[in-house]
Image (tube, rainbow, N blue to C red):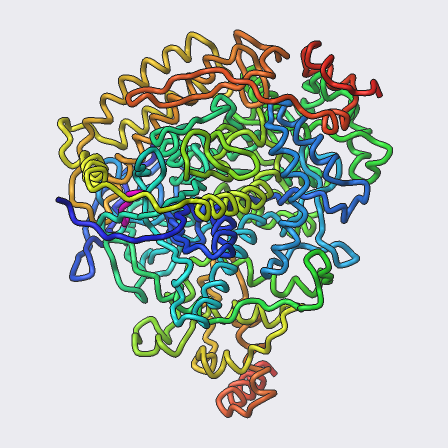
Amino acid sequence: MAEFERHEYDVLIIGAGGAGLRAAIEARASGLRTAIICKSLFGKAHTVMAEGGIAASMGNVNSKDNWMVHFRDTMRGGKFQNNWRMAELHAKESPDRVWELETYGALFDRTPEGKISQRNFGGHEYPRLAHVGDRTGLELIRTMQQKIVSLQQEDFAETGDYESKIKVFAELTITEILKTDGKVSGALGYWRESGEFVVFEAPAVVLATGGIGKSFKVTSNSWEGTGDGHALALKAGGNLMHMEFIQFHPTGMVWPLSVKGILVTESVRGDGGVLRNSEGRRFMFDYIPPVFVKQYADTEAEADGWYTDPENNRRPPELLPRDEVARAINTEVKAGRGSPHGGVFLDVSTRLSPEVIKARLPSMWHQFKELADVDITKQAMEVGPTCHYVMGGVQVDPDTGAATGVPGLFAAGEVAGGMHGSNRLGGNSLSDLLVFGRRAGMGASEYVAGLGSKPALAQSDIDSAIATAVAPFNGASKENAYAVHYELQQMMNDLVGIIRVGAEMTQAIEKLDAMKARAKNVSVTGDRLFNPGWHIALDLMNMLVVSEAIAKSALEREESRGGHTRDDFPTMDPKWRAIHVITSWDGSKVSTKRESLPPMPNELASLFDIEELKKYLLPEELAQLAVGGN
Amino acid sequence: MGYLASMRIWRGNSADGQLEEHKVEVGDGEVVLDVIHRLQATQTPDLAVRWNCKAGKCGSCSVEINGKPRLMCMTRMNTFAEDETVTVTPLRAFPVIKDLVTDVSFNYQKAREIPAFKGPENLKPGEYRMAQVDVQRSQEFRKCIECFLCQDTCHVIRDHEENKPQFAGPRFFIRIAELDMHPLDQLNRTKAAQEEHGLGMCNITKCCTDVCPEHIKITDNAIIPMKERVVDKKYDPLVWLGNTISRRKSD
């Protein structure tokens, strides 16, 4: 029998980004002993990379803003594929979640009246993003981290032990969720540092593991974005939904190669940056889709006027939702109108003074200066699409975050699906983390309170989970995990990337089968002490499962919508709006099915103009709505 | 691809270790972290290294490069000559776990010893009002990415393990300063900075400011103003002398 440490908690939170930490605060508030699992050091989670801001309709800059406008923008951005209940909760609760951060010590940029300042962003009708320069994610993660520490200080004052109620397990990776009699009973993990195994006994597990970008070659995600939570949920019997919807952020760095994919914040465009092709044309005017013609300017003069007079001018098309801009850049580059390194030009130097650029976009200035030798106060940046965010994720109950089909499993943040539909608006991610992190913490607390006795862990399950985790040390072949990972990323970029075709995806699914077989035989050298070769071998299994879910979901959906664009089905089809592609795991492969959601209630549908609804809904869906034809 | 670089990497664990030389390919525009990753993928799969965002935002990949505390992701290879050997070693102020990874738990302990932000009790969430010019001072310190390079370079603890219990280090002096300058924080923090966190042990050599990848003026904007406030409350001959001398110099 293998040796391991054993810990008992009421709730285990996997992931220490914004969603995980917010869930932990809520779970502790309900009196639960809470463990937080962090794959990196505490405070390094990918949330730190968020730049632009947190969307919340506080109305500090334009008092016309309110939750209904935010809800409408979110549904439009997601092309109505969103779980409307999640979009509703998110729009209603995000202002409270932002104000709460100030009581934890966050210091946002201010308006002249001393309120939290709000900035413009793609797809948001009014200035809505609370921000700190272009380092809002850092502020969020540090604030949450410091709030957790402050709670530990309170616990220390009361019990003499900082970790009596919340303990952070840093640099620990979970490999398997354990279940007993169909319910969650705990999880197995290993310390990255020592390679020693750790068994957690916990009746509730909250997944807050973030994204999947590492399945793609060009990505803004760090090494942590290997889809661990997506894979853990699938293997525990949960469902994923919307996995075909991947957001390719329009502006990643394209040069130098070593930083290809690193994010260039949307605030550059929100603050006045324009996109031009190699001919000097502001090409976004050529790409305004019919559903958005009412909201976007069709001349440069009107677009330029919007920055100072938004009441009388429509928005510049650079601020269309991310999927639209990413596709436009892709088309320009393919048509031979790209920049020298295969992107397009993003220029903020023509509109803003060097002082203003350095004040509003300090980390962009720093990033380009230090990594690319480009001074953005004088020169244009070269940018192109980068895999940034997965809209798809664990199918959950909107109000509690409870994963469908697995009692005791919860999910929040990027790993959960539904909230953003087919495309997420910038700024809606940080608010998502806070709103649904809190709700998952509450959901887990209620679940634990209602549980008679905690399910006991079975020794045989622990043993078999450990055997799976050490398997790469006994790999049958000389296969190198790094090499398989490299091939996977290239393949996903080429065959299931920003523009997709049925035949290529079928090919991708075949290749994934072959890669899965090779990954099983990966062999690792060295021992378990901080061994990255072993870590990547285990992460690779997750990336393969997630990639399979993406490829199969994308093949299933025969239309183009948001973060899913098919060359063979180039238009949006209202028939598909009502259909949600769900994936599950049958022990050896991913399978797909189609589900529908309950229709949007009248009070939400009536927030839209009937003419707009006609673009998205089927006639029979419209007939069921008592929308007053306004 | 560009050229073959000579990299000298420290390999070992808490007991012992040594520098190992490797020849690694370097491509255009690459940083030290790219080269370390190529080494991992092609020659030393079990080389331990901590990293995360690869964009200078998370502060994970802190090491010493040719003896200087740096982030690997922000150190471009073209800052070295092609025939120059680049030496990468773990942070010296913290115990080695393996290869380039050190045990930085000291910093997390210190973080716990500083009382958290305490907001005004008469204001509800949403009622906070602060002027931009007032939050700006604290915002400078909140740019900190917790790379701990300042802690690593600080000579009070770099080679003086015995000072660690009573010295929080520059990273936490800016944390205290940030809270102290927060327009709505209710606690008085300067006395504790001096008496519990070792502010007086700092003799303002500015090494921390020099290595900060976020260019935070740790010494000038956080440590010196706090020392001055301590002096306001409590006579401190060292600081008084330091101030007098430095004033005379600049005159």
Q: Could you tell me residue A517's position as x and y percent?
A: 23, 21
Residue A190 within the magenta-colored segment of the rendering? yes
Above or below, B74 against A566 in this view is: below
Q: Please give the range of residues in magenta.
A: A187-192
What number of labels is visible?
0
Above or below, A599 against B103 in this view is: above
Going by the picture, which residue comes out furthest to the right? A312
- Residue A53: quadrant of the picture: top right
Q: Nearer the viewer, residue A495 or A231?
A: A231
Q: Could you tell me residue A163's position as x and y percent?
A: 39, 63
Q: Nearer the viewer, residue B213 or A380?
A: B213
Q: Could you tell me residue A205's position as x and y percent?
A: 40, 43
Q: Nearer the viewer, residue A609 or A206?
A: A206
Q: Nearer the viewer, residue A405 or A470?
A: A405
Going by the picture, which residue comes out furthest to the front? A452
Q: Could you tell me residue B127's position as x and y percent?
A: 73, 59
Q: Is residue B195 visible?
A: yes
Residue drawn where x is 56% and y is 34% of the image: A398
Q: Is residue B55 visible?
A: no
Residue drawn where x is 80% and y is 44% of the image: A62
In the rendered image, which quarter contains the C terminus of chain A? top right
- Residue A188: quadrant of the picture: top left
Residue drawn where x is 38% and y is 17% of the image: A591
In the rendered image, which quarter contains the N terminus of chain A? top left
